[in-house]
Amino acid sequence: MDPSVAIALGLLLCISCLLLISSWKKGFGRGKLPPGPVPLPIIGNILQLDLKNIPESLCRLAKEYGPVFTLQLGVECVVVLHGYQAVKEALIDHGDKFADRAHKPLFELSSKGLGIIASNGERWKQIRRFSLMTLRNFGMGKKSIEERVQEEAKYLVEELKKTKGLPCDPTFVLECAPCNVVCSIIFQKHFEYKDQKFLCLLNLLNENIRISSSPWIREKQQPQSEFTIENLVSTGVDLFGAATETTSTTLRYGLLLLLKHPEITGKIHEEIDRVIGQNRTPCVEDRNKMPYTNAVVHEIQRYIDLVPTNLPHAVSEDVQFRQYLIPKGTTIIPLLSSVLHDDEEFPNPYKFDPGHFLDKSGKFKKSDYFMPFSAGKRMCVGESLARMELFLFFTTILQNFTLKSLIDPKDIDTSPIASGFIKIPSFYELCFLPYKNM
């Protein structure tokens, strides 16, 4: 054997041993971690995961190792929580200890630990408190926000009417609508969908490039305060990106599911005709009188399982969790997919069925297992806005249009395509035909 090759192999072996020892000291050497598959040197348990469908791989491993198990991803120990009880126990019952955000290269690269998504400790507490207060001051949860969403829904309908019933890809307009809602809140301005500044903003969000300025971010910097310009800018980017991407993707995925199930769309039309009619704009109060439509919106969010592995958490201190001791800093993956697809709470969970949220009398049925916005301390700050938008946008679209698929509904593929940690549907086209109340 060539001496240089032998040296290289020797070095590789030494490095592998050091990494394993380091990993043991970091995790297994401090307390009792949950069970898990035996890791290989350097790569850990990577080969036991289907990288095209990680949630399914984790669910499969949970059947073998239980609802709380450990994976070795490279040199990092990760604890996976599977099922409602484990996720609830961690994120809600022990919320303070499981509220940290895991340190990931992606977060460090894009935000340097700033903003509301990637920050931890006192920084995160201050920024989250400030964000919630500011959103409330701008009208979150108040009638004024509902009026902004209603107004944007009208603009959305007008844009869809311009298609004149011809085939179109709805991606762009469905992204514009929720983004414009946030613009109307923060900038007090609605942008035309072809406005170049607005298009630039959308492009920046899509490319995950930092927005350099925002009119409401002008605070005096103080010692011991996290309200630096850079931190607040990052928070603004977080809120813009989350409010736009998740809602627009849910809308696009939802329309695809409605194309796939025209009988469900027909029932929504009947409920809209009975409760709202054609002479007024849908409002949030209608939701309580429209159990079927409300159930469909919930089922869309449950079925598409938008962020299946959640954003990774971390424990802020050594935690005694069940019979295990999880060391401080350990990455935690609360598998939301396992909650949203629980087969006892949602019989036949991989079937799109609004009946999952309806009781025997047809009334809307709440479920504690409905966690598309996560749960506990890190729950999405914009949940109430997102829920309002989804209901009002869906009902306003169906109040005005009949959805026509370009292919036979039974041939529509609703399986997601891989895209980071968010599930997105394949690109598709449909026709928005004027709805005529028969």
Image: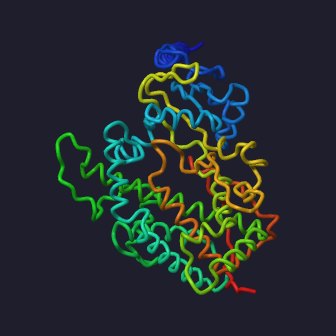
Reply above or below: 146 against 20: below
Q: Position of residue 15 (x, y in %)?
A: 49, 17
Give the residue displayed 20% in from the left and 40% down from the top.
Answer: 224
Q: Position of residue 313 (x, y in %)?
A: 49, 36
Give the residue displayed 71% in from the left and 43% down from the top.
Answer: 342
Give the residue displayed 55% in from the left and 43% down from the top.
Answer: 310
> Furthest residue to the front?
361
Q: Position of residue 377 (x, y in %)?
A: 45, 42
Of the 4 image quadrants, the one containing the C terminus is bottom right
Picture quadrant of residue 57? top right
* Left or right: 409, with 85 as reference point: right
* Left or right: 224, with 377 as reference point: left
Does residue 114 appear in this view?
yes
* Left or right: 30, with 335 as reference point: left
Reply above or below: 381 against 125: below
Reply above or below: 312 against 280: above
Q: Position of residue 197 (x, y in %)?
A: 37, 72
Residue 230 or residue 282, whichever sits in front? 282
Reply above or below: 406 against 244: below
Picture quadrant of residue 352? bottom right
Of the 4 image quadrants, the one containing the N terminus is top right
Residue 355 or residue 57, whichever sits in front? 355
